[in-house]
Amino acid sequence: MSVSTISWEEGRVKIIDQTQLPHRLVWLYCGNLSSLWRAIKELKVRGAPVLGVAAALGLILGIKNSKAKDFKQFSKDLDRTIQYLSSARPTAVNLFWGLSRMRKVAYEHRNESIGRIKNILLKETFKIMEEDKRVCRQMAIYGASLIKNKDRILTHCNAGSLATVDYGTALGVIYKAKEQGKKISVYADETRPLLQGARLTTWELLRNKIEVTLICDNMAADLMQKRQVDKILVGADRIASNGDTANKVGTYALAVLAQAHKIPFYVVAPLSTFDLNLKSGKDVPIEQRKKEEVTHILGKRIAPPKVKVYNPAFDITPNNLITAIITEVGIFRKPYEKTLSKLAKRARE
Amino acid sequence: MSVSTISWEEGRVKIIDQTQLPHRLVWLYCGNLSSLWRAIKELKVRGAPVLGVAAALGLILGIKNSKAKDFKQFSKDLDRTIQYLSSARPTAVNLFWGLSRMRKVAYEHRNESIGRIKNILLKETFKIMEEDKRVCRQMAIYGASLIKNKDRILTHCNAGSLATVDYGTALGVIYKAKEQGKKISVYADETRPLLQGARLTTWELLRNKIEVTLICDNMAADLMQKRQVDKILVGADRIASNGDTANKVGTYALAVLAQAHKIPFYVVAPLSTFDLNLKSGKDVPIEQRKKEEVTHILGKRIAPPKVKVYNPAFDITPNNLITAIITEVGIFRKPYEKTLSKLAKRARE
């Protein structure tokens, strides 16, 4: 847990370039808005919770050179930046959550000087980062209460320290269980097309001395059939008010398989991943990514040039397949329409 | 359908080197037993039905230089060859079927001269190849009766012309449906780790002017949830007497998902793929392949060196998830223990 996935350093956003892992641990410094936008778009920084942080820091980059003399001018720069950052990726709601929180803070201080507002916004990003660290650890405590010694846990994509500031959501639960003295082994789905499981999850689990076995996505069912999986833990990119969960494509298949094999299926996500304005998962916009992510691997072509491709980045797991949703304020269970309504009420207040 | 995946040409086995596809259509000539053994082991030639043919032709290579003067000596050369070829791959039963058929023919002619036995065995391989062509077309006729105009068919791995002499099992059904004037579109699972779907299935479907969309294996569930898949068609590597089916890893997941989404799930396989001595799928030996197939893609590393890997080449789909099994003698349905018992009876006679 010694490295931060994202931080603010001398006026620049410092991130781990996740496209270079597991081969090299390379730091990337984004000194302006467009370079950070590209880093988000190209998944150099990815993972729902950390996208909330990246959005807030991106906003700082976007307004730091604002020449606005009054709040009216400043709010135009602010909204232009927000609009631009919003276009980087459509599904993970944390991005919009981070931007909207920053915007709200700016408007709350609209009567202050522009210089002071900029300062307040920068402080807010530090708060967001600190909160992420605290929230992940709190989720992990709740989650670890569900984990037994010797559990064999299957996970998909990367919901670890690399998807947050420094601890993780689904993998945070595993780190906490280990801290509690439980022996845990993990099966990591490689997670095609971009191989976040093979590249990132294995990397950070090995660094944290947790036993991990890499599988291709299509091997998970075989392990479940052989009773080699005790629990499935995944993160989330957006959770609707009824508990329907958007997460990395392949998650839905695991949830169906988990039900067929009577294996508990847990989603681990902070409140910033909930979009309580949405009635169900049907309303979540799903990012379609480019064909080449499927037809090429590491720059090499694996399929004929003329083939058509379907490449959604996420899928929707319906609430009835989710055993529990673990958050920083507790563990939620079915019926989610009812149990999550308290959150919705709190959000409205 | 103009090319043969495997043939006998001037004393050598001529195969398409499938590891070169879709980039290059390269022919490989195996003039001796060990080069053919390597071609099978390295999946330059793969697919259950064609492995039956490759085994028979391999046996010809193994005995062609036999200096045996009598059948006793000759049978030693024969059995050594059979044992060696048997070691190439353990799961697809067609390999053993081909070898055992050839051995039986040799023994039936044990009183003939060695030269004449060699000739008879070569003729038997031609018969096996002709049968494969005929059997595939017959299965396709039965299978196509289940296919409707505008069906969207999902398939896994490659069960096409490249897995047989020239027509295919699951893809043969699609070719026949097209010949009947039905418009078919196909979703091809890329089929990690060795990408037979991305490399081979897309290649042969495009050559045959059939609309094909490539997906990562973990996207199939999303398509089913969106009602984009009407039927699932796969081949088989070994079918037990109760209908349990071993096929490329990932097949079992599709079968569970098909049931959850009420999508028909069909297995298309010739009788040579049935192993009626086996009571159930539990008895099928599953080939475990090397770690590097998962940790590397096209020679490039995608995961940390120290990670453990689970890499079974096949999985078992239990009979209850299979809507029907399509063979050259008709379509079999549940309960397979009963319906397949006629085959078992016929095999014993």
Image: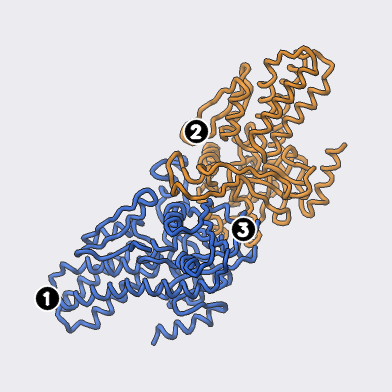
Chain colours: A orange, B blue
Residue assigned mark 3: B228
Q: Which of A206 and A316 is in front in this view?
A: A316
At x 51%, y 58%, the residue is: B250
Three-letter amino acid code at the position of disc 2: Gln
Q: Can I make out residue B59 in this image?
A: yes
Residue assigned mark 1: B69
Could you tell me residue B235's position as x and y percent? 47, 66
Q: Which chain carries label 3?
A: B
Taking B296 as reference, is A115 above or below it? above
Taking B78 as reference, is B196 above or below it? above
In the current view of this chain or complex, which residue is farthest to the front?
B181
Three-letter amino acid code at the position of disc 1: Lys
- Total residue callouts: 3
C-beta proximity under 8 Å, tags 2 and 3: no
From the viewer's perspective, tell me whether residue B276 is left or right of residue A318: left
Three-letter amino acid code at the position of disc 3: Gln
From the viewer's perspective, tell me whether residue B134 is left or right of residue B62: right
Helix, strand or loop at mark 3? loop
C-beta proximity under 8 Å, tags 2 and 1: no
Q: Which of B248 and B2 is in front in this view?
A: B2
Do badges 3 and 1 share one subunit? yes
Q: Which of marks 3 and 1 is nearer the N terminus?
A: 1
Residue assigned mark 2: A20
